[in-house]
Image (cartoon, grey):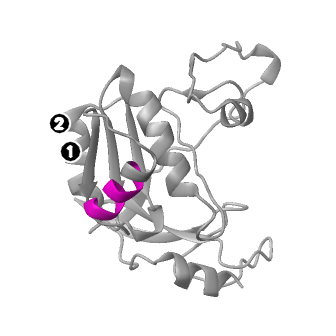
Amino acid sequence: MAKTKTIFVCSNCGYESQKWLGKCPACNSWNSFYEEKLQVTTTSGTNVKLKETAKPLNLNQVEGKEAIRTKTGVEELDRVLGGGIVKGSLVLLGGEPGIGKSTLILQICDKLANDGKVLYVSGEESAEQVKLRADRLNIKNDNIMFLGETDIDAIEAEILSMNPKLVVIDSIQTMFSNEITSAPRNSESSKRNNS
């Protein structure tokens, strides 16, 4: 019989705990724990953990392949990303509120939407707010689709249905899943908690 078990894992060192801890006892980092759900199978009264563990590889025996990169149209960003965005990769854009992250993202969406659909998911701003920014930037692209949603499962369903070239989530801390018991946080509470 399979059951779901929750553990908390330190993102810095991998230390596992049955409960959330503010400070990791192994590496002393603060607020580094994230929640992880595990499938636990009960066999003859014993619990077997079904978590796959990674095995070390000899780095000299790994074949290095150059990834195909998509140019964002923003020269400095392409340089920072090593030549552009790698298909299937995740890029986390961070910074203080108001410095232009959403503006930059919308400009990238406009450039990449020339090659296919782009899905802009926002948990903080309405479609009207994003449209006003697009108008200010003179962005008029029929391939940019807006989704005002914070439920990860609904977003995943839309991504699978649409199969866009690029997905933007603005911002990740507003997202939630019924599988995870912690509540989403907004940018201001994250900023206060990290101070």
What residue does disc 1 label?
158
Is residue 80 placed above or below 131 in the rendered structure?
A: above
Please say whether residue 156 is visible from this viewpoint: yes
Is residue 38 placed above or below 72 in the rendered structure?
A: below
Tell me what residue is drawn at x 63 percent, y 59 percent: 94
In x, y percent, where is residue 17?
58, 75
Location of the C terminus by quadrant is: bottom right
3 and 115: which is toward the camera: 115
In x, y percent, where is residue 52?
50, 44
Q: Are marks 1 and 2 in contact (CB under 8 Å)?
A: yes
Q: Amino acid at mark 2?
A: Ser
**Quadrant of the image occupied by residue 39:** bottom left
In x, y percent, where is residue 36?
46, 64
Instruction: Report the side of 106 relative to 67 (left or right).
Output: left
| Secondary structure under the numbered disc 1 in the rendered image | helix
Q: Amino acid at mark 1?
A: Glu
Range drawn in magenta: 127-134
**Quadrant of the image occupied by residue 154:** bottom left
14 and 119: which is toward the camera: 119
| Secondary structure under the numbered disc 2 in the rendered image | helix
Tell me what residue is drawn at x 80 percent, y 77 percent: 28
In x, y percent, where is residue 181?
35, 77
How far apart, in angstroms, are the residues tagged by discs 1 and 2? 5 Å
Is residue 156 placed above or below 78 in the rendered structure?
A: below
For disc 2, the neighbor class at 10 Å (few under 14, some 14 to 19, many from 20) is few
For disc 1, the neighbor class at 10 Å (few under 14, some 14 to 19, many from 20) is some
What residue does disc 2 label?
161
Magenta highlight on residue 12: no
Location of the N terminus by quadrant is: bottom left
Tell me what residue is drawn at x 66 percent, y 63 percent: 95
